[in-house]
Amino acid sequence: MEEQHGPAQPKPAGRPAVKGTLARDVDEYLAAVPEEARAALETLRQTIRAAAPQATEAISYQMPTFKYQGRPLVYFAAFKNHCSFFPASGAIVEAYQDELKAYDTHKGTIRFPANKPLPAALVRKIVKARIAEIEANAAR
């Protein structure tokens, strides 16, 4: 079992779109996701990768994950009726609540319809804020 560090890890709501599948990597996860959600998550993945080129991809909690300095940076997943982006930090979601008004948020979760993906500029800001949060915690 993976050791938890920092804020509580995401607990996906609803039924995962990749039901019954244990993906070994992000490509395998995305290959099992319905087309519309896959397109939204691929775009999200590319935006995260561009904002955090030093982060590594993994599967954690059965979801695609980016890790930074060995810590969870962000997660994302597809569900039956929505996609989710998990910054793994309630403080980050709260900090961007005004920009997230059009989306369903709860603690460290941002839910969005596959046909209304999160704006790339907002994703970049959230990823950069998470990097700063991880670095600040590491400096303590």
Image: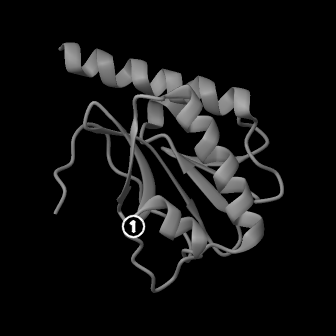
Closer-to-camera residue (130/33): 33
Where's residue 131, x and y in %? Answer: 41, 24
Where's the N terminus, which quadrant?
bottom left
Residue 133 lies, with reference to residue 21, above or below; the image says above
Where's the C terminus, which quadrant?
top left
Q: Quadrant of residue 35?
A: bottom right
Q: Residue at x 46, y 30 (%)?
A: 91
Mark 1 neighbour density, 10 Å: few (under 14) some (14–19) many (20 or more): some
Question: Where does label 1 land, which residue?
Answer: 62
Closer-to-camera residue (96/27): 27
Q: Secondary structure at mark 1?
A: loop
Where's residue 56, x and y in %? Answer: 38, 41
Q: Residue at x 71, y 71 (%)?
A: 81
Residue 57 in view = yes
Residue 53 lies, with reference to residue 32, above or below; the image says above
Left or right of 135 in this view: 1: left
Q: Residue at x 37, y 69 (%)?
A: 24
Left or right of 21 in this view: 1: left
Left or right of 25 in this view: 8: left
Where's residue 77, x and y in %? Answer: 55, 60
Q: Residue at x 56, y 24 (%)?
A: 95
Residue type at tag 1: Gln
Where's residue 106, x and y in %? Answer: 56, 48
Residue 98 in view = no
What colour scheme was applied to this rendering of the protein? one colour
